[in-house]
Image (spheres, rainbow, N blue to C red):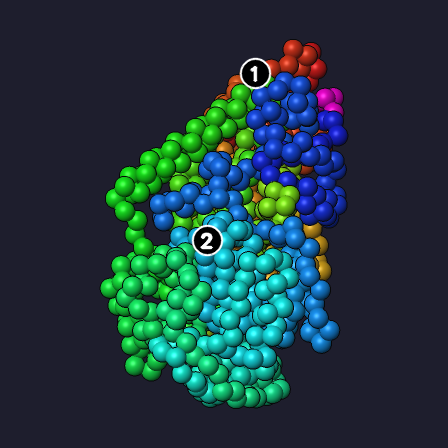
Amino acid sequence: MSLTTSVTPSQPLMLIAANFTAEPLEPALAFWLNQFNIPGRIKFAPYNQLFQQLLDPMSLMARNTSGVNVLLVCLEDWLGPGRANVENNETCNDASANPTLTSVAPKHIPAGMVPYQLPNGMTIAHQNKYETDYLYTEIFLDQAYLKHGITIKDGDCIVDIGANIGMFTLFAQQLSGRGKIYAIEPSPPVFETLQVNAGLYGDNVKVINCGISNKTKTATFTYYPHSSVFSGFVADKTADETILRTIIQNQQQISSGESSAEYVNTFLHNGRMDSIQYSCQLRSLSDIIRAEQIEKIDLLKLDAEKSELDVLQGIHSADWPKIRQIVMEVHENAEYTVLTQVSEILTQQGFEVQVDQESLLAGTTFYNIYAWRPDSEELDVSANFQRTNLDARLQRNVDELAQAIKDASQRNPVPTLLCLCPPAPSTNAKSHVSTLILAMESALSTQLADTKNVMLLTSAEMQQYATSAYFDPYAYKTGHVPYTSAMFAAMGTAIIRKYRAMYARPYKVIVLDCDQTLWRGVCAEDGAQGISISPAYEQLQTFMVEQAAKGMLLCLCSKNQEADVWAVFEQRADMLLKKEHLVSWRINWTPKSANLIDLAQELQLGLDSFIFIDDNPLECAEVRANCPTVLTLQLPENPQEIGAFLNHVWAFDRLHVTQEDRERTRQYQQNAERERIRHAAPTLKQFIDSLELDVQIAPMIPSQVERVSQLTQRTNQFNLTNIRRSEAEIEQIRVSATHTCLTVTVRDRFGDYGLVGTVIFDI
């Protein structure tokens, strides 16, 4: 029960401060506020003013008296100047982690070439859109060539073997700055496009029209005009088509969750694997090194389509020490010996080796090998010093942030939502740095755990609405805008989901069907031992047990014989949901809407606080028609989707769990015993006397703020003003000189009801 008077909350404001440019969040935030009819305004603090907003008593954040203050923090940006590539014992400049467009205006694309604008704004010449899009995602967005500590720095010399139309060359050109790039491509038609692209954004690329092998010779090159990335000197149309088919299926599966054989067949039968043959010159890499007088190769990128062993065998022993890093695509053979041979060669030449496979290439014989030279002992000492400084610097910033948030929360009780934003993919690829960032997230969570009105969204939670390409290296460099528009939309959704949970009236009861909901099968037909409890149903039951622990009341509503249902509960040890988790049930052949109404009367709760879950669309439709205020959820037809489905239902969200919440199931079970005694008592007075009621009314104490706020959110018919109050507002009332809050606690011989009522009034 909650009785409140006056103290009308002011218009809420969502005040956002970030250590990066966060304004692209606004459309998503505004959309969801409008979608849920949540009143409020959105305002952004000046750029990169986290600490100023927290510490300055006259800041926008300090003057926000209602709504929420949102802090967006990318811990990666506190690693100091540049991204520390501690795995390679060197410090990368900003460009190496975040390639940007050169300021040089692109040159004109000749007539006859097909121009194409990449998502980052670069205009290039290209041949096949689907190939260009694939390469852009792989190279620019996923940064597949910068994994496992591989870096490109200003001034680096890069050799790109198998350059195709120059996508990696363009990527590396933006990172290497004043460095030199040698782009090598044997295919005459593709080389023409490479030649154009290499000169569009700078003059530091030397293009060479030949193939690379173990010696100088000529060979037949098979060119697939519509699938140029599969062209090579060792072509096999059948094998290449099989690999392409797998990649297309993987791409469909990742983007839409399913793969259409019809689509794949149409794609492949449209001349995709038609070929033209050319006679091309082959040279060894050592020949190129001598001819171009290359003194060092900071990164050798190699994509030679089944010729990688020949390329490595053509490097003279005197030239191996000149190569610092290698990223190469390897095509495993039927005997699975190529990976082993390549790894042995690289290891013998002093490289450390890591083998990886991209998700789109799963099920194929394509692998990536990353190789780098371990640095000298002297550099190892330097790297350890850098790593120690890196840890200390980030730890200091995190500690200061936590303290600033604590201090600000004492001055201003408006809720604070701290959002920890994900780092760049290239940072995640560095094991020490990614581990350090996760440790700092955990440290923040621990330090702020007991701070009232402060909530946390981890970087994983900020990515709960997954986007494949979330980081935008170009926007990051040009305007410190780290994320794609899709990622900003996902982050905005996560923020509003948490914000809505602060004020939304929570549901109190979950009513579950049994057959095909708690288990697979029909207990009346299959028997207790015949039904199946697969991992998907275990996940659902675990979720429901967790909901009960948070204060939700669990009930069953099933068209069955009770004996059949209880046989499953009693005989199946793998039933994670137990009878003691339930407060009531209706197992009969009555329409489920009627059973829900009956449950609501028994529990003395409104139907608008009920969630009904069933797999049957007809049962769901019947409940929606007759109990429209019940939130009816139909489970996905595919059980494997149940977990994701439940995790994305906002109605289950709870910001806090009080002691009263944890005791709620037990209290309702005790109440059922009271009702049994009440019906057995001769008179109502005798029943009340037998309860030994103890009612206490006292001023609110700090530990009760959370529960009092919860009561104002949850109570309906006994909330005389219908005003919903946040913890911040209740805390303001508690310390106010003009208002008083009393709390009501009740217990009887059956147990403790806890804090059940509050009265707020003007003095």
If the image is split into quadrants, where does the C terminus sit? Answer: top right
Q: Is residue 492 visible?
A: yes
Q: At x 46% / y 37%, what residue is drawn? A: 79
Secondary-structure class at tag 1: strand
Q: Which residue is mark 1?
A: 699
Q: Amino acid at mark 2?
A: Asp
If the image is split into quadrants, where does the N terminus sit? Answer: top right
Q: At x 64% / y 40%, what residue is drawn? A: 21
Q: At x 65% / y 11%, what residue is drawn? A: 737
**The magenta segment:** 4-8
Residue 467 percent across, percent down from the top left: 57, 57
Residue 412 percent across, percent down from the top left: 61, 21
Residue 273 percent across, percent down from the top left: 55, 86
Residue 164 falls in image quadrant? bottom right
Q: Amino acid at mark 1?
A: Pro
Residue 740 percent across, percent down from the top left: 64, 15
Seen from the viewer's position, the closer of residues 35 and 242 is 242
Disc number for residue 16:
none
Query: Quick check: 164 above or below 448?
Result: below
Secondary-structure class at tag 2: loop
Magenta segment main secondary structure: loop
Q: Is residue 582 magenta?
A: no
Q: Which residue is mark 2?
A: 156
| Left or right: 588 as drawn, with respect to 362 | right
Task: Tell me the crowding category of disc 1: few under 14, some 14 to 19, or many 20 or more residues within 10 angstroms, Cα based.
Answer: some
Seen from the viewer's position, the closer of residues 684 and 185 is 185
Task: Tell me the crowding category of disc 2: few under 14, some 14 to 19, or many 20 or more residues within 10 angstroms, Cα based.
Answer: many
Q: At x 60% / y 24%, what residue is drawn? A: 52
Q: Earlier in the sequence, mark 1 or mark 2?
A: 2
| Left or right: 120 as drawn, with respect to 297 | right
